[in-house]
Image: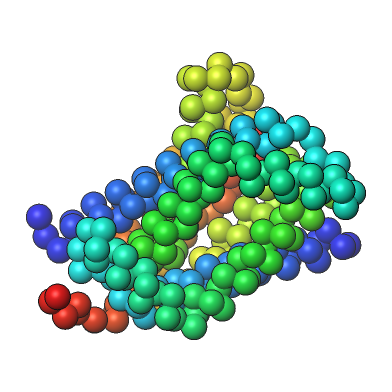
Amino acid sequence: MRVALLLGLQILCSTGGEIALTHGMKATGEPARLRPRELAAFLWRATQSGWLWAGVPLLALSFYSLLVLLSWQPISFVIPASALSYVVGTIGAKYILREDVSPARWAGVVLVCAGVALVAAG
Amino acid sequence: MGHEGRIRIKTLVMILAMVLCANVGDLMLKRGMMEIGAVEISPTGLWHALLLTITNGTIWIGIFFLTGFMLSYMTVLSWADYSYVMPAGAFGYALLTLLAVVFLHETVSPRRWVGVLLICVGVLLVGQTRPRTTEVAVRREVAA
């Protein structure tokens, strides 16, 4: 039971953190060119985004939950189970970030999720 | 090349950088932690491990690459969809398996090969879709 709860927390924190990060980066706007100077200015602008700082603690919490899960359960269970975050993340991308998730993209996400689970299960 | 094509190339290059940085970074962390040895879970043991970790060069190389991963991830998300970059990044798992076979001569179970195949097909499918489906904040740099 506690494994399922922590796994749920880990998945929600990692996808929530990445969605907040994506939102912050979209609000920052892309760098005009991928040159060191423009990139440095762009990354500095990104640090001014509140969404970035909402995402980072969530990602830290998801990392910490993953470490605790790994201390309870073998890696061949933990990583395949957390691969569910590909599906949860895509749902978040569609309904929160309003991205257009086409059937082809959905099919790809489901295959990737199953594939990561199989690879990590060994 | 059209606008769409440029975005696609730019996105794929950044995803490749992400995957390489993440794999090299993880590998270096693992190597560094093996140099340190098993960590004893006690206040003195953890303190000792922390001191060994922050004075280990291999660990710092790992942190350098993982920082590179985070920055390239942030950069690519400023123009590309999260639902495009996230599954495409799973290509790293497939790459790790191939590297383990080629360089470390590890044997890989049939189940794991099926997983690699599914990831590759999945990434190809996602790769076919448009990398960006939302509007991006139009914010032009004032020419310096």
Quadrant of the image occupied by residue A49: bottom left
Q: Position of residue B96 (x, y in %)?
A: 52, 34
In this view, B54 is above or below B85: above
Residue at (63%, 35%) from the top-left corner?
A: B32
Q: Position of residue A34 (x, y in %)?
A: 24, 59
Q: How many marks on residues? A: 0
The colouring scheme, among rainbow, by chain, secondary structure or one colour, is rainbow
Looking at this view, is B31 or B23 the one in front?
B31
Quadrant location, the N terminus of chain B: bottom left
Q: Is residue A33 visible?
A: yes
In this view, A63 is above or below B137: above
Does A42 sit left or right of A53 as displayed? Answer: left
Residue at (37%, 51%) from the top-left corner?
A: B15
In this view, A111 is above or below A96: above
Looking at this view, is B118 or A5 the one in front?
A5
Residue at (56%, 78%) from the top-left corner?
A: A54
Residue at (23%, 52%) from the top-left corner?
A: B9
In the picture as drawn, the residue positioned furthest to the top comes out as: B105
In this view, B131 is above or below B125: below
Looking at this view, is B42 or B123 the one in front?
B42
Quadrant location, the C terminus of chain B: bottom left
Q: Is residue B29 visible?
A: no
Q: Position of residue A28 (x, y in %)?
A: 35, 77
Does B25 sit left or right of B112 as displayed? Answer: left
In the picture as drawn, the residue positioned furthest to the left comes out as: B1
Quadrant of the image occupied by residue A68: bottom right
Q: Position of residue A71 (x, y in %)?
A: 82, 48
